[in-house]
Image (cartoon, rainbow, N blue to C red):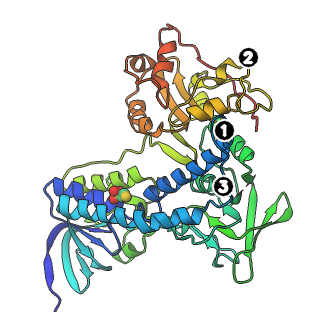
Amino acid sequence: MKANIGEYDAIWFGGGAAGRFGAAFHKALGGKALIVEEHHLGGECHVCRCAFENFFSDQASMAELMRVYSGKSWYPKIDLSNISAAKAAELYRKVGQRAFADTMKHQTEKQLGIEVAWGEGKIIDKNTVEVNGKIYRGKNLVIGTGSRPTMPDIPGINLPGVMTYKDHPEMRSDPKRMVIIGGGKIGIGKAAMFAPFNIEVTVLEKYTCLPKWDRDIRNFIFRDFKRRGIKIYEGIDVKEIKGKGKVESVVAQFNGETMEFPCDAVMVSVGLTPNSEPAIPLGVKIGKGNEIIVDEGCRTNVPGIYAVGDAAGPPYFMAIARKRGMIAAKNIAGEDAKMDYSFVPDHIYLPPLEATCVGLTESEAREKYGDVVLIQVPWGPKPKDPKPEEYYPGFENQGLPVCGRMHTLNLLFYGQNRNGLVKAIVDPKSRKYVGFHSVGDGAKTAFQYLSYLLKIGWTVDQMANLHEIFLNAEHFIQLSRLVAGQKELKGFAAQVYLDDDF
Ligand code: COM
């Protein structure tokens, strides 16, 4: 007979972002919460995702900035022949993974006083979980088992040298040539992270890279990638990964022809698959993408069973995972809380920059509102083949710096627009913003709040009343004030698309 370890209001099966935040919220509401976790609290975040990618993209930013600044202005020539992505990963493994795991444990168990059953959990039924031979009973069960990279079913997918975001911190040597399969935000971000480390990167995307992003942002990225030698193929169908004992090339069909891309590493980033398997024996409904189907309150079809985080399917985003935990906690506590998926921002690492967006793209906005107003810098024609450290008269619109750490980029490469862009889209009739977009550095903080302002129908007039701390990373307050005085709102920038120029 196994010991029965008490009765909980909810057992949070998985202590990742969703389970950890859910259990914390649940406890704060007065509930008795137990997290069951085998490895570490905080899920993949500090192992290989948000915390790791923040660190690694910062390393990549350093490398890229050293490269572009080397020998220019007062910067010395910098020898980058020995830089190493593997060394950067090693530092994270040695310090980051452990330090963040400690922090998560300390915060959860010590500071928040949440009980954790450490070990591999076995779900016996919807009210019973076994961990290390001990039985835990819960009135509710919350599944927060996360997701895993989707692996295409192609020959060679298991060859050594094929990795996913999960293996990125584990890299022990520096590849010379890498093929990235999948040009979504993970693939594009990884391309921008690896290229600064002297790795020749090629991205192969079956359909379109970043299809949901605003065209100006996509153009900026593609132009930047071209300058950096990162190759992108869209509409290419990967058929096979070849190699004797380890990866040697990727074979794909492109425009009816077979192409072979020699490489010594492959990063697969074609999507995520929810880890719904532990919930299947409980009779919960599973969707086509392997996700646990939930209602807006994170309830499954089985009363008393909830699913949160990536296990409940897209959008795969840290804030959504954590908020699903919070919503489930509220409902377990007797509220009727619902998830709100409107105006969820999105973000891509593009070291040394980053891209962030929320709301409608320009083309979506034009479709919905007609002639929208753009508040955008820089905007306008660029000088042809501009050289670093030179001023180009007659391109007035290029000079307004997008900020963060990019002042130097802006001035060393004036005319090349390497520093990014900002773009707010406004419906002139209601004077409300409908979308915000940025490539830059440091703007993502503002987007956390901008997403809420979009939701409440924020207008240019309200924005004009805020207090900017000039210079700032996204410029929206001061740029909006420049046009907000107009009775009939006219654009700050163009009302038509510029030609693609990459
Ligand atoms: C972040 C993980 S490292 S969590 O969302 O705080 O649990």
Residue at mark 2: 394
Question: Most extreme residue toward the right, as rendered?
Answer: 257
Look at the numbered disc 3 and give the secondary structure of its residue. Answer: loop
Residue at mark 1: 220
* 408 or 259, nearer to the observer: 408
Residue at mark 3: 80
Rendered position, 412 above or below 263: above
Q: Are there few (<14), some (14-19), or many (20+) residues within 10 Å of tag 3? A: some
Q: Is residue 370 left or right of residue 204?
A: left
Name the quadrant where ligand 1 sits.
bottom left
What residue sits 72% from the left and 27% below the top? 390
Q: Are marks 2 and 3 in contact (CB under 8 Å)?
A: no
Closer to the observer: label 1 or label 2?
A: 2
Q: Are there few (<14), some (14-19), or many (20+) residues within 10 Å of tag 2? A: few
Asked if the beta carbon under badge 3 is closer than 8 A to the nearest atom of ligand 1, the reply is no
Q: Where residue 409 sits in the image (x, y, percent)?
A: 61, 35
Q: Are marks 1 and 3 in contact (CB under 8 Å)?
A: no
Asked if residue 446 can be seen in this view, the reply is: yes
Residue type beneath disc 3: Leu
- In which image quadrant can residue 304 be found? bottom left
Residue type beneath disc 2: Gly
* 354 or 385, nearer to the observer: 385
